[in-house]
């Protein structure tokens, strides 16, 4: 099989952590051909999607004492060329958020790939439809009490009967910009003004879940089915479990409640072409649906002794998704 990965520059990727690296490594291990490119090089020529394609071989990693061991450098590049994406079986759209204008423009170009022959993971239409915060709002029986608004009065009303709430920017990633609001905080009005840009930009406001002290669980799904999970436990004095915010990854199992949540999401995810997804669960509540560049494979493999990337690539090869 042939795969193209649209990713951030390779020098920014951590091969011991990054899921894109794990997926590329798995494809190479299974004898597939892999190319890398960037959003900026995507072009539409004669009705076909083209890009600057650079072949890559990602060398195998090994576990030693619970740590990933990688070669340095961890990859080898071949000569690049400007080519059509039409011959590719999959195109992985995995630049990190935020979803910018450039990101949206890239999805418009990827719409011109025929999904019968070239599957984009995740679907361009699905990526446009699924803001990682707001998308969860359609599953109202699975999420904590939540509003999305730019209005100060609505935020204050939501906070009125709660000691604490969590306020999230709709375009944030890795826990960036998430605030814990308290009724008695003398900075409350200033925090709301800053987050909503003086009432012009909506934010998500969610009831605070005390269960965060036990961790923010990440469950990865492929083709609607849960693969594995990790728990991300906040540092002392911190309320965010995101690994980018210093959360500590620990082993986790997929519980019956997790499976119930996944089963409820699966038909909608499949309909929207969202094949590879990471959902976040705190205290049995769905809090986010991550679709742009969900991560966690390296940590899950490290704890469980699995090779999830190879499992996914084998499923793609069998076209069982």
Image: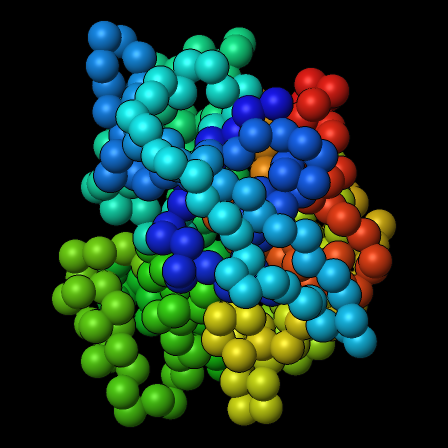
In the rendered image, residue 37, in percent from the top left (x then y), is placed at 37, 38
82 vs 262, nearest the viewer: 82
On-image quarter of the N terminus: top right
Relative horizontal placement of residue 73, taking residue 177 as reference (left or right): right
Relative horizontal placement of residue 252, taking residue 14 as reference (left or right): right
On-image quarter of the C terminus: top right
Toward which corner of the image does residue 82 lie, by quadrant?
top left
Furthest-front residue in view?
A: 79
- Name above or below for residue 116 compared with residue 54: above
Q: Is residue 145 visible?
A: no
In the rendered image, residue 106, in percent from the top left (x then y), is placed at 29, 32
Please give the name of the residue rendered at 53% of the width and 9% of the height, measured from the top-left corner: 116
In the rendered image, residue 102, in percent from the top left (x then y), is placed at 23, 40
In the rendered image, residue 55, in percent from the top left (x then y), is placed at 46, 36
311 vs 267, nearest the viewer: 311
Please give the name of the residue rendered at 63% of the width and 64% of the height, measured from the top-left corner: 70
Toward which corner of the image does residue 224 lie, by quadrant?
top right
Toward which corner of the image does residue 177 lie, by quadrant?
bottom left
73 vs 254, nearest the viewer: 73
């Amino acid at each position: 099989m042939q795969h193209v990965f649209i990713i951030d520059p390779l020098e920014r990727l951590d091969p011991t952590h990054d899921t894109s690296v794990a997926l590329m490594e798995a494809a190479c291990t299974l004898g597939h051909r892999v190319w890398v490119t960037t959003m900026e090089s995507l072009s539409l020529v004669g009705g076909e999607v083209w890009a600057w394609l650079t072949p890559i071989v990602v060398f195998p990693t090994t576990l030693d004492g619970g740590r990933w061991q990688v070669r340095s450098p961890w990859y080898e590049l071949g000569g690049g060329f400007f080519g059509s994406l039409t011959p590719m079986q999959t195109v992985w759209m995995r630049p990190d958020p935020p979803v910018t204008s450039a990101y949206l423009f890239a999805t418009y170009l990827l719409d011109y790939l025929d999904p019968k022959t070239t599957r984009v993971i995740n679907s361009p239409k699905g990526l446009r439809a699924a803001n990682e915060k707001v998308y969860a709002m359609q599953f109202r029986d699975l999420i904590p009490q939540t509003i999305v608004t730019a209005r100060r009065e609505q935020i204050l009303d939501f906070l009125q009967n709660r000691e604490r709430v969590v306020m999230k920017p709709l375009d944030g990633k890795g826990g960036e910009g998430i605030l814990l609001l308290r009724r008695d905080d003398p900075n409350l009005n200033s925090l709301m003004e800053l987050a909503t840009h003086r009432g012009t930009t909506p934010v998500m406001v969610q009831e605070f879940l005390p269960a965060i002290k036990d961790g923010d669980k990440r469950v990865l799904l492929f083709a609607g089915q849960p693969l594995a999970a990790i728990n991300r436990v906040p540092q002392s004095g911190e309320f965010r479990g995101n690994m980018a915010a210093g959360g500590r990854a620990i082993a986790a199992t997929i519980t019956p409640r997790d499976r119930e949540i996944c089963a409820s999401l699966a038909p909608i995810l499949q309909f929207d072409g969202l094949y590879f997804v990471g959902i976040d669960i705190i205290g049995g509540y769905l809090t986010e649906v991550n679709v742009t560049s969900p991560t966690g494979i390296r940590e899950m493999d490290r704890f469980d002794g699995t090779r999830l990337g190879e499992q996914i690539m084998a499923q793609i090869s069998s076209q069982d998704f």
